[in-house]
Amino acid sequence: METIDEHLVRQLSEWSAGAPAPADPSPDVEVDAGLLLDYFDAQIQSRHLDLALRWLQSKREGFYTIGSSGHESNAAVALALRPTDPALLHYRSGGFYAARAGQVPGSTPVTDVLHSAAASRRDPISGGRHKVFGHRELNIIPQTSTIASHLPRAMGMAFALDRGVGDTGYPADAVVVCSFGDASANHSTAAGALNAVGWAAHQGLGMPVLFVCEDNGIGISTRSPHGWVDRMLSALPGLDYTAADGTDPVRLLAVAAETAHRVRAGRRPAVLHLRTVRFMGHAGSDAELAYRSRSEILADYARDPLLATAAVLARRGILAPAESLARYEQARKLVMDQAEAMLGRVERLPDAAAVTGPLTERRTDRVGAAAARAGAGREKVFGGRLPEARGPLTLAQSVNAALHDALLTWPQAQVFGEDVARKGGVYGATRGLRKAFGANRVFDTLLDEQTILGVALGGALAGTLPIPEIQYLAYLHNAEDQLRGEAASLRFFSDGQYGNGMVVRIAGLAYQKGFGGHFHNDNSVAVLRDIPGLALAVASHPATAPALLRQCLALAEQEKRVCVFLEPIALYHTRDLHTDGDGGWLARYAPPDEWAAGEAPLGQVRTVRDGGDLALVTFGNGVPMSLRVAGTLAAERGAGTRVVDLQWLAPLPAASLLAALDGVPRVLVVDETRAGGGVSEAVVAALVDAGYPGRISRVNSVDSYVPLGPAADHVLLGEHDVLTAARALLD
């Protein structure tokens, strides 16, 4: 069967020999000849890069063959925008990349793409970690093989550009562009993001984002129902809808320019429905004949966007068919010469080394500066009642005070989520923040966790320091890919050039009496511990929670880390430790001039109680539980029990833990998460790997969902379980 390359060359040759080129589909629309030539050059560069990537694969020097052939009309979108407009691109955006690079002198799009597909260290965006369209100087933010997972980020970035919080790094009238495929438009992530954009626009909020749906009518092998994408996209509330065809280059250039101008000037969102065609299958390994007929594939050749542009160039007297063919062949030579020059010379990473190492074991120098800045304006922010003068505080009160100080300290910080503003949070942890700092910095979102994290993802790229709240730990599972696939991966796939510094606050864990069930008593953190580069801290006591939160904020700002700050709901309003009225779980709030002195180095465990016979290693709710058990063991046996609070569950502070256990012959890991997939598995493995010489045991909650009411006690780890296990270890 004739290939698309052979078909194009044959068709241009026939036109050169006198066969008539097709009629201009939009003779009434004017276009600048130079713009049309730039468009054609970007298209043919993209096409030859697709061919070169398959050739590199045949030589075992290329590792990526999902191409842009048939989608080259997306170059018109790049030409309608400015190179200062941030772009989040679909993996078939080769034409866009070539056109955007053509707008920036000194760019090298051919070598960029070749090195990226070859996993070469000279890939300018990922350093050889993956094939992505991205470049810092081109303002193209790298996305992996996304199935609409980047749309919430695009929404969040557009939202942040017009909020006036922090230095965005982009012009005041910048527009966010985000491309995706017709099959991806059906994904729940796309539906949520598009709904959130419309929801914001409906309220008159600035939302300068241009979504481009590149519709080739098929998702790998599954056809999009005829008319479905048009109906779905055109019915989106709050978004302007425009359709264009890739086989009508002049009208497409005009429509793209008009749509981009409308988004830029009106700060309102739009969808450009770009009809395309897909050539050469989904990827190099795709046997397209298994689900499409030969005649159907060949019939699509007539819709080749390169031929459509060449025909218009000929009809308008800008470029004769023979000149278009010469231009096409010249581009082939340029691309293939560079591809051939790479053979056997590609330097690759020795491993998949991430830019996601352990927490830096140093004091966060930002905290010192934070303390100095926090002093100004505190009286007003706290309404004349400074938290350090209020007496001992609960965990919820100390977190609330720390958030007030954080927003005062970091002027680019924002707190947002469900019910966090007017209500002040379900448990009062954000009470008073909106009144003190205003709706621009503390605001309620719609009820969608993907949107909450998308606002954070986009805001982090636009100069804010996001502090989103997920109302309950179980709710995170609705949107966990926004952390795993988008937030934490960006530093890896951009070789550290981009980051998503944020602190995600989550109310979670179990032991709420008379309330809960699975969705409010979730004791699973496995998904968070499995994300490379993500830092997971768990608060336990009001004396240490504020410093731990500030360390997360400093990590997010300085290292662009994705941090999760887990707050145990059952400890929010706890006041006592051993007996009613003892106030053992209250603490004084430290004023700014004490922050630096009281801050432990990053990634360190905390020894809460000392003892030499047994160590209880724990976190969260396990800390007060273990302290009570330690008191019982001392009373009944005279045993000295050391209690160690991990504080950081990811990366696990193994070296600090081993040092804290020095001289103790027995360790019991007290883990409120489940036996399977829980924290204790990692702790025990870390101790064994480090050669801890003593006896090790663990005690956990049951591998079960958490039921409602008193039945929860049958599956959750209790003090009796800890005491029984500790006695057995001492015996």
Image (spheres, rainbow, N blue to C red):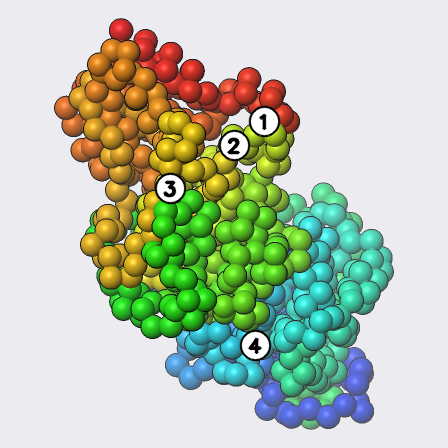
Residue 548, position as x, y percentages in the image: 34, 49
Q: Is residue 433 left or right of residue 342?
A: right
Between disc 4 and disc 3, the foreground one is 3
Name the one closer to the observer, 453 or 376. 376
Question: Looking at the picture, how far across and down is residue 609, in whole percent?
Answer: 25, 30
Look at 61% across and 88% down and name the residue there.
35
Residue type, mark 1 in image: Val
Residue count near mark 3 (Cα–Cα under 10 Å), binned few <14, some 14–19, many ≥20: many
Q: Secondary structure at mark 1?
A: loop
Which dot marks residue 162? Answer: 4
Tell me the kind of residue under disc 2: Ala
Q: Pointer 4 and pointer 1: residues touching (CB < 8 Å)?
A: no
Q: CA distance from mark 4 to mark 1?
A: 43 Å
Three-letter residue code for mark 3: Leu
Residue at the farthest front position: 581
Q: Which residue is mark 2?
A: 510
Secondary structure type for disc 4 = loop
Q: Earlier in the sequence, mark 4 or mark 1?
A: 4
Check the picture and name the quadrant holding the C terminus: top left
- Which residue shows up at 28% across the image and 44% down it? 603
